[in-house]
Amino acid sequence: MTILIAGDSWANPNYYGPPLPPPEKHLQYLLGEQGLDVINLGINGGSNFGSIELVQKWFDGEEIINPYPYNPPVYKDQKIDYIIWFHTSPLRDLGPDKHYNDTVLPDTYYMDLNNLIRNTMTNNAKVIAIGGCCALNKDIDRNLFHYYIDCWKSDIFNVTLPEAKWWGTNNKDFLPDPSKEEVDQTLLVEQYVFNDVDAFPDQGHPGEKPHAELSQRLMADVFQKNDK
């Protein structure tokens, strides 16, 4: 069984040393230990459209230039069984070099994103969506996914956390000031991720235990069943 991982830095093992755990404690390596073949296309700082467009390039057989110590092999005829996609803040898709050269999300953002997921990922494999750095928005079509986790942060802390688009973005200097609601959501998320160094060692990415739990969850709920 072959798994393709895509998304932002939450999709990537840590190759930079402490405080985050070593690469072998990341989902990619944990699934590999279970006998799965794993290809990783995660890009630190990546956006939703950018990460899915990279998946399309991979399926098209284009050379993938990856800044990490590996380059995923490109086999046009290689069958991918599942894509694990880590969703991030939609605000990352705004900017001069991004999908939308604007400072506000268009009303069609989620319709456009749903269409891209449908045309790029569901045509090639079963999709597992993880609400990672940013929870899955209510307008994302869950019917596109074989399996999904609305908000991994909420599951890690066993509370219901807000979507928090502003907390998850990395282009704040380009964007207008956030609304009071966005600020309040950010502060609420920070109460948890800043105060639990075991769950979030660098205050921005899940640590060893969350990745172990996610690996066990996906193995039990998806891969060991494999539609049986």
Image: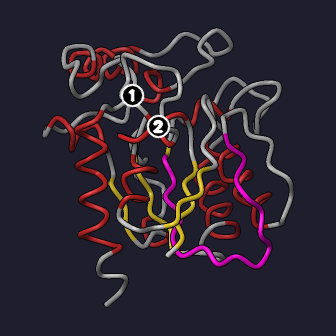
Residue type highlighted by circle 1: His
Q: Are marks 1 and 2 in contact (CB under 8 Å)?
A: yes
Under circle 2, the secondary element is helix
Q: Is residue 108 visible?
A: no
Image location (x, y in percent) of residue 114: 59, 61
Residue type highlighted by circle 2: Trp
All told, the count of numbered labels is 2
**Residue closer to the observer: 209 or 126:** 209
| Residue found at x 82% / y 28% | 97
Classify 76 as above or below 216: below
Q: Measure the alpha-carbon separation of dots 1 and 2.
A: 6 Å
- In magenta, the rendered stretch is 70-86
Looking at marks 1 and 2 on the same chain, the residue that comes earlier in the sequence is marked by 2
Residue annotated with mark 1: 205
Per the picture, the main secondary structure of the magenta-coloured stretch is loop
Residue 81 belongs to the span the image colors magenta: yes
Classify 10 as above or below 15: below
Residue annotated with mark 2: 10
Residue 3 belongs to the span the image colors magenta: no
- Per the rendering, the mark at residue 84 is none
